[in-house]
Every structure is written in structure tokens, then in C-alpha cells.
Image (tube, grey):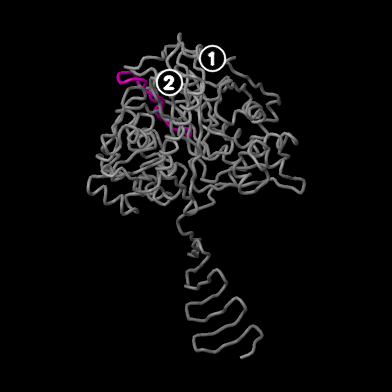
Amino acid sequence: MSTASYSERIAMGPLVAAIDQGTSSTRFLVFNSKTAELLSHHQVGIKQSFPKEGWVEEDPKEILQSVYECMERTCEKLGQLNIDISNIKAVGVTNQRETTLVWDKETGEPLYNAIVWLDLRTQSTVERLINSTPGKNKNHLKHKTGLPISTYFSAVKLRWLMDNVEEVAEAVLTHRAMFGTVDSWLIWCLTGGKNGGVHVTDVTNASRTMLFNIHTLDWDPELCKYFDVPMEILPQVKSSSEIYGSVCLGDQSAALVGQMCFQDGQAKNTDQGKMDLNNVVFFLFIFSKWLMSDHGLLTTLAFKLGKDAPAYYALEGSVAIAGAVVRWLKDNLGIIQSSAEIEKLAGDVGSSYGCYFVPAFSGLYAPYWEPSARGIICGLTQFTNRSHLAFAALEAVCFQTREILEAMNQDYGVPLSQLQVDGGMTSNRLLMQLQADVLCIPVVKPSMSETTALGAAMAAGAAEGVGVWSLTPGNLTTIPTDKYQPLINPEESEFRYARWKKAVQKAMNWETTEPITNGNGAITNGNGAITNGNGAITNGNGAITNGNGAITNGNGAITNGNGAITNGNGEH
């Protein structure tokens, strides 16, 4: 098809764009609002830094610059196609949600790096909060927030910034601080920044902070008091589809819109991002009424598509490490050179041969919410090789999804008949077949994988005052799909899943921030130093002193309190 005829065809309708700012990359995508066709896009990677074990940060300026670069390059590509960029009528935003930023509204400068959603530095804060609740209940705030008290969400990250970063504390005291998730930072910057930028978020992002009341659909004074967060630093909460300079929509909610999930009881699963990116598997049912989970899921805002439109809620499961396990195999173990290799490597063996991988690098999220868990690989034999590890890594994504599916079926009461999937990992056909085999239900994949960005574009195009995209069911564009049917018998699936559950239990309670004491009062800290109830101490090298001052080192030399010395051979 010639460039001229192509541009004539796509000029039939207005264009709508989406900023898709994820954990490991940023993209800018432009769609035809009449056909939902992706016309052009550009992607830029985002660097992560790991200042300490369990800490994950990103540079807010790099995030913003990546947006500018993606927008510029995409517009250049549109120009090469003879497409007039003035046809872009609205821009939506979809973003990594719980990642937390604080910046100075007078200078426009970030006051610290963005703390990424999977960061674990607040684990001791979370444990302290849970231990202070009646019955040490991690669901103490769930009746208002829909969320457990967890390192995952923004409030504890914001509390850490206020307690540990002098610049943040000072800006809060002098009323210069602004808090937001990535959507708020981008929209504030893109709408003027320190020169009148709009400080807003939407209900889907706000509902992931632990400061937002999912019944009143606004910040909750009691929750803000609980975390000692001044309400003046919070953005104004808006719907997910209205004009305020730019439209924001949390990433998984955007994917719900992009997959045309507008009715009660529809579900989707997202293997978000490319295979070598940190990502989360989400699994959502949407409802017009609020529903509390009794099986470890979150109640969150799915979307509110207009200022006066009703809010829709979702039950959601979140897994900390899914596609990132592929990156770990590549970068940390070096058993593959590129993420694309894993499908062939795993396909060569077609089974893990009893090897199970629990990638709890940042603890376990839904349905366990157990920050003390750590990753394990078990079931190893002399026969196990890198192909089996690759297969086990892909299977782990599927087992984690099944755990969430079972929790969802218990909460909802109606078993799911098929699962819709989207995102970069869906290009792995082996993974899609494994997902169907492990779940024992069909897996449906849209031929156009960019449904998250499409959803943000749809919400932007449907906003009152834009009106170039209709979200009424009769007007929605149908996206072609591929369907994967289960190929193994249910008994085999049940056996493998039971083994996985056994492996998960082995991963539990591995790490703690608190000292450990046994029944006799013996205590060990993180460096291995031990004291028993009588005061005897040994350090990591084996040197020992008892309560009377007698000392022996690792070689057996001994001195008592009177200064007599003996070495390991008994000489005095």
C-alpha cells in the first residue's frame, strides 16, 4: 500500500494518543479513533537503581524526558506517513501506579527519586503498623481502602520520604511539597509545571495509595491522620475520563477499557510489558458495586469514565514478579542472552521435570501478602539443566495466575469460563499454552497486544468536550483474537499445581526485619552475632565471651578473667 493511500484511509477519523509509562519503559502511541488501529508509536527504556538490597528507585526527570522523547519520535514517524499530528484530539495517560514521588511546586524539582512500587524499604514500617492493630490484622484498613497494609502501596513510601529525606520534610513544613504517583507528576509537568501545572490524579491511581476511601471516592481524613500525611500535599481526585490538560488512567484499569470490559463479571489477566521487564500479573473482575474479598484479593477502582459517571470497582490480584523472572535468568544467571530465547529453550524440554520456581524476590503479593517470603528453586536433580529452569520460570507465571483465579472464583462464586490476556508476554506462544493448561480453561489473546494504551486513548477520546470515541457497547470496535485451548488432562494440571503450592510454603517466612529469639532467649541479628540468656556472645567469626570474661577465638585460644592463656595445643 502506498504512503498516500494509507494516509487517506487513516484520515477518515480523528486520532487519539496515549502515554504508557511503565516500570521499565515509556511509550507514546497514536490510534485511529474510528478503527482502533495503532498508527505509530515509539518506546524508550527506563533505568532502575538499587541503592540498597530491596530498594528500587527511578529518576523522575528521566521518566519525564522519556515521555518527551517518545512523543517527539512518534510525531516524526507520523510525519513520515504524511499524517497531520494536529488530528490528535486527546492524550491519555496510563502508568505504573503505586510508584511514589514528591516534588517542589515552586522550583519544579523532584525532592528524591521515585520509589518504585516493588520497593521493600518500608517492610519494618509495615510490620510495626500491623503489630499495632487489634489482633495484628494486616486488613485493618481494608474496609475503607480495599487494600491490606503492605509495602506495595504509596502511603508507607510517602511516610518514609517524610521521615528520612530532609528536603522532603522541609518542603512539607514550608508548604512547598507535592505528592503524586507517576500520572500526577507527568500531568503536572505536561500542563505547565511550576507555571500553573494541574495537580491531579484519577480514582484508579488514588485507590492504590491507602489514603483514599473507595466509598466516598475521595481522600479520607482519618486515613491521612493514621499515616500522618498532610492532605494539602495530595492531588485533586478526578474521574478517569475528563479534560484536565491530560487524561490519566492507572495501567490495569486502562487495559480493562482496552479489552472492552464494561460489564459486571468480566475478567482479564495482564502479563504487562515486554518479557524482560519488571512487571505484574493482574487479574480483575469488575462490578458496579463494591465487593470485599475474603481470599486475599484487593478491592480497587476499575474506572470512572466521566465526572458524573458511576464508578466501577474491581477485584484484583497482583503478583510482584512475573516477566521480570525472565530478565533475572538473563541478567543474573546468564542462562539466556535475550528474553526471546526463553520460549525455544523451555520448548526444547516441554516440562520442568519436577523443578519448581517461586520468584518471590519482593515477597509474595496476592493472595498471600507475605513480605517475608523469598524466591526459591526446588525439586532439583542431577538431570536438571537450564532448559528445565526456563520452563519452570514460565510455569511460575501461570501458577501465580491460577492462585489468583481460585481466589477470584471463591469471592465471586462463579467459575471463570475463559481468560482474556494482553501485554508483551502474550507474544510467547508457549507461555499462552501453559496458561491454558494450568488453568484448565481457554486463554484468549487479542491480535493487537496494546490494549492498555488503547484503553487510555479510548478514555481520553471519550471525555466530555473531546467526544471522538464512543464507549457504548454497540459502537465498540471488535478486536480479532487468538484462543488457546487446554491440551493436558485436569489430573496432570492438578498434580503440578499441588507441587507448586508445596514450593510456595517453602518460600514463606524466610526474611524478617525483627531480631529472632528462641525459647531460651538466644538472639541472632542480621550479621550472625548471637547472645544466649546468660550473656555468652559469639560473633560471625566464632569468637566467644561468656559472662565472666573468658574468651575463646575460632582457633581455640582461651583467656579467662585472670589473664591465664592457653592455645589450642594446651600450652600455657
Name the residue rendered at 52%, 25% in the picture.
Answer: 450
Residue extending farthest right: 383
Q: Position of residue 260 (x, y in %)?
A: 48, 18
Q: Position of residue 210 (x, y in %)?
A: 36, 38
Name the residue rendered at 64%, 40% in the picture.
Answer: 338
Q: Is residue 177 left or right of residue 356?
A: left
Q: Which residue is mark 1?
A: 6
Q: Which residues are magenta?
A: 290-310
Residue extending farthest top: 474
Say which of 203 and 184 sits in front.
184
Q: Secondary structure at mark 1?
A: helix
Dot 1 or dot 2: first in sequence order is 1
Q: CB of mark 1 within 8 Å of CB of mark 2?
A: no
Name the residue rendered at 64%, 46% in the picture.
Answer: 377
Q: Position of residue 481 (x, y in %)?
A: 59, 18
Q: Is residue 537 above or below residue 331?
A: below
Q: Secondary structure at mark 2?
A: strand
Q: Quadrant of the N terminus?
A: top right
- At label 2, counting other C-alpha atoms closer than 10 Å, the crowd grade (few under 14, some 14-19, many 20 or more) is many
**Is residue 324 part of the magenta span, yes or no?**
no
Considering the whole magenta stretch, tell me its main secondary structure: loop
The Cα–Cα distance between marks 1 and 2, rounded to whole angstroms, is 17 Å
Disc 2 marks which amino acid? Val
Q: Position of residue 247 (x, y in %)?
A: 36, 26
Say which of 86 and 15 sits in front.
86
